């Protein structure tokens, strides 16, 4: 029997081989996406189980607190005019950066989804992208085992429930990990665009912008051929947060409008950690509420982990971003029960534990991760079902 050696048949076999090779090269995606799906299913099951008797609205809990502000911005846009007090209840939307609500608005516009459902769909897709980005970054910096452990630690941490809610943390982490991965692989255009997107999603994007500037400085110091592309990539990211603050100031008539909204609405000011320090000391000395004490212990653990991360000489851009994210979370006053959520994007505080567990015996690592995961997923479910204050 003759074998068909025509150019068309050969090209078909070559294309099929390339497709199969590409699919095999993407098999690693199953790990982060599996972690994302498994932790989300388990946590949502816990949320449903912990709802008060007679309540069946898991979705209502996922759209509580700040999710309402994001939906309002997506639906109605930002207010315009002078800001007097937060009691007006219209100025508060200016505190929320536009990245997430714009995507919610866009999804609502092109689908039959209502704004609440659109907010959750965007958040879940973004969280899945964050899982892929974090895994890819850690695998590029270390190896697959470290990447797996770090992704597990991230999605099972005490306030990882926010990654299932109508909040912007998942989208922000997707942009952060994507930008850092692009910078590490020296794909500077992608790093710059993702850095700008992060800066327009949360104020912590300023930390990522500084991290990209550090990556550019490393490229300049090492006299790489692409050093000026690295510098150019950092510029839009550095301009993102100031641009939004300037826009708010123009819209409200005063340059410090965004800061006024934060202070009047949530009592948030940057006090260099004095408020957080007093909170921790008072909680350890006289705290009677277990959530209060647990938050104090989480803050202590985060600071200790950051010190260890510095000692481990983690890749400088990741380290700088994480330290700034931690400083912004700990350094500002405000509701103490929001602190664990603000720590979620501070990725570097999880890296020392990921490195240690990745090098531990498999049975030991599995035991520790199982205990950590069950507690962390339960903790977040508790804070949006039983706990009565905002997160």
Image (cartoon, rainbow, N blue to C red):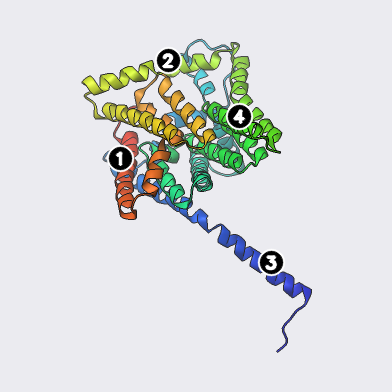
How many other residues sit within 10 Å of disc 2, few (<14), some (14-19) or many (≥20)? Answer: few
Distance from Cα at disc 2 to Cα at disc 1:
36 Å
Mark 1 vs mark 4, foreground winner is 4
Q: Nearer the viewer, residue 340 or 164?
A: 340
Question: Which quadrant of the rendered structure holds the C terminus?
Answer: top left
Q: In terms of sequence position, does the residue under pointer 4 or pointer 2 come before the other?
A: 4
Is disc 1 placed on a helix, strand or loop?
loop
Q: What residue is rendered at 24% in x and 29% in y? A: 290
Q: Residue furthest right?
A: 7
- Residue denoted by label 2: 271
Question: Which quadrant of the rendered structure holds the N terminus?
Answer: bottom right
Task: Describe residue 222's horizontal placement relative to residue 92 as left or right.
Answer: right
Q: Position of residue 198 (x, y in %)?
A: 57, 33
- Residue denoted by label 1: 51
Which image quadrant is residue 192 in?
Answer: top right
Q: Are marks 1 and 4 in contact (CB under 8 Å)?
A: no
Distance from Cα at disc 2 to Cα at disc 3:
60 Å
Q: In terms of sequence position, does the residue under pointer 2 or pointer 1 come before the other?
A: 1
Q: What residue is rendered at 46% in x and 54% in y? A: 31
Q: Which mark is residue 213?
A: 4
Q: In terms of sequence position, does the residue under pointer 1 or pointer 3 come before the other?
A: 3
How many other residues sit within 10 Å of disc 1, few (<14), some (14-19) or many (≥20)? Answer: some
Q: Is residue 75 visible?
A: no
Q: Which mark is residue 15?
A: 3
How many other residues sit within 10 Å of disc 4, few (<14), some (14-19) or many (≥20)? Answer: many
Q: What residue is rendered at 57% in x and 11% in y? A: 82
Distance from Cα at disc 3 to Cα at disc 4:
41 Å
Mark 4 vs mark 2, foreground winner is 4
Distance from Cα at disc 4 to Cα at disc 2:
25 Å
Q: Position of residue 182 (x, y in %)?
A: 60, 41
Q: Nearer the viewer, residue 352 or 300?
A: 352
Q: In terms of sequence position, does the residue under pointer 1 or pointer 4 come before the other?
A: 1
């Amino acid at each position: 029997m003759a074998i068909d050696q025509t150019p068309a048949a050969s090209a078909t076999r070559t294309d099929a081989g390339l497709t199969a090779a590409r699919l095999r090269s993407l098999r690693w995606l199953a790990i982060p996406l599996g972690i994302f799906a498994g932790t989300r299913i388990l946590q949502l099951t816990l949320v449903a189980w912990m709802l008060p008797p007679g309540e069946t609205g898991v979705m209502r809990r996922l759209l509580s607190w700040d999710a309402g502000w994001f939906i309002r911005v997506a639906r109605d846009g930002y207010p315009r005019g002078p800001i007097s007090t937060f009691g007006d209840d219209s100025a508060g939307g200016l505190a929320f950066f536009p990245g997430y609500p714009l995507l919610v608005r866009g999804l609502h516009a092109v689908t039959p989804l209502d704004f609440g459902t659109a907010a959750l769909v965007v958040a879940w897709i973004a969280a899945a992208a964050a899982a892929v980005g974090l895994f890819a970054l850690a695998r590029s910096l270390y190896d697959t085992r470290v990447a797996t452990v770090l992704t597990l630690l991230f999605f099972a941490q005490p306030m990882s429930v926010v990654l299932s809610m109508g909040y912007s943390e998942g989208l922000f982490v997707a942009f952060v990990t994507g930008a850092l991965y692009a910078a590490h692989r020296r794909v500077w255009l992608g790093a710059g665009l993702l850095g700008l997107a992060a800066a327009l999603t949360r104020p912590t994007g300023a930390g990522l912008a500084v991290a990209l500037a550090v990556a550019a400085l490393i490229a300049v110091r090492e006299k790489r051929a692409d050093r000026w592309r690295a510098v150019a990539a950092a510029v839009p990211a550095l301009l993102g947060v100031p641009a939004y603050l300037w826009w708010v100031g123009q819209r409200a008539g005063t340059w410090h409008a965004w800061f006024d909204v934060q202070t009047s609405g949530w009592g948030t000011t940057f006090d260099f950690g004095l408020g957080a320090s007093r909170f921790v000391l008072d909680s350890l000395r006289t705290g009677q509420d277990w959530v209060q004490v647990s938050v104090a212990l989480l803050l202590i653990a985060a600071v200790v982990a950051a010190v260890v991360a510095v000692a481990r000489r983690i890749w400088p851009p990741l380290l700088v971003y994480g330290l700034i994210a931690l400083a912004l979370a700990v350094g500002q006053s405000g509701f103490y029960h929001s602190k664990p959520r603000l720590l979620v994007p501070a990725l570097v505080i999880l890296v020392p534990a990921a490195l240690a567990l990745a090098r531990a015996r498999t049975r030991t690592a599995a035991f520790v991760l199982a205990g950590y995961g069950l507690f962390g997923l339960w903790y977040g479910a508790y804070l949006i079902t039983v706990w009565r204050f905002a997160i």
